Amino acid sequence: MISKAFDAIKKYDVIIIHRHSNPDGDAMGSQIGLKRVLQVNFPDKKIYAVGDDARRFSFMDGSEMDVVDDAAYKGALAIVLDTSAKSLISDERYALAETVLRIDHHIFVEDIADIDIDDTSFESCCGLVAYLVREWGLEVDSYAAKALFTGMVTDSGRFYYDSVTPRTFELASFLLSKGFNPGEIYANLYADTYENVKKRAQFVLSIQFTKNNVAYSYSDKARVGALGMEAQAVSRGYVNTMGDLKGVDAWVNFTECEQGVLCEIRSKNLNINQIAVAHGGGGHLKASGATLKDKQEALQVLDELDDLVENGERI
């Protein structure tokens, strides 16, 4: 499948790269990094990156999305990165392309592509892309390497999560050898203002616990507004604040938004993906998410998670 994917890349003169909506560092990094690699190695091809706004990852070079007409998809290759669910893809016009290639590291949800490279053993889509472009013998410059490294850092929790393997560090070393300053990446990702530290402290004070010690927080629109943050930033940005609490095997962050309630679920030793999938989401065994209809569904998820902690098999 790896060679078939590369054959498709070589075949098409127009390649349009998609990723999931509300992008995280991995989605942005894989999209920017792959676009750059293809531009450098195939200068005669037209390579585009499309999707919604980069938001908190707008500091990344190349985060501005291209404007592409529908006509560009005719006879083109669309590459979908970092998602296995149709509902999560930013810009549904990927389906207009002649051929669709998906590159992802999440648990498979549904068929969305003609060619699939799906490997859940990778800690990040950026790590998978870095592996692929090296296997294909493509040149990776510092611009692309910096983007891919950024996604590896964010999706591995700064190389902390148990999805990290020796291969993770080997690929990170490969990218670092291309010459960029990782300190600049860490500063953009994690250095913060005193005001934002206070906001995080307010979030910590909102954490509650179920009978089986599931840590959770529910931020309604009023709280999100009071924090002066986007719902996505509260949802994903704060979920792992609960991850280092002793005696907590699973935790969930609920954040109200215009679409409903963003739900980010994490665990140390339980398959919480099954809960996310049951509510229209997906992700990894120990890190998944979904967008719920309302607070009532959020409370249902919390009950299911509490039951899983009490009765579920540890992994």
Image (tube, rainbow, N blue to C red):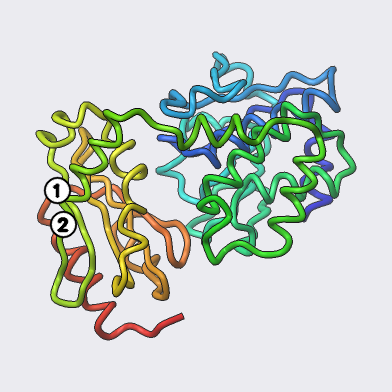
Q: Residues within 10 Å of mark 1 (few under 14, many from 20)?
A: some
Q: What residue type is labelled 1?
A: Asp
Q: Can residue 263 be seen in this view?
A: yes
Instruction: Give SS at disc 1.
Output: loop
Instruction: Give SS at disc 2.
Output: helix
Question: Farthest residue in the front direction?
Answer: 194
Q: Which amino acid does label 2 sit on?
A: Glu
Tag 2 residue: 297
Quarter of the image where one finds residue 306: bottom left
| Mark 2 and mark 1 residues within 8 Å of each other at the beta carbon | yes
Tag 1 residue: 294
Taking 98 as reference, is 205 above or below it?
Answer: below
Residue located at (23% from left, 36% from top): 199
Q: Where is residue 22 in the image (x, y as percent from the top left)?
A: 40, 35
Taking 101 as reference, is 77 above or below it?
Answer: above
Quarter of the image where one finds residue 308: bottom left
Question: Farthest residue in the right direction?
Answer: 137
Q: Is residue 95 visible?
A: no
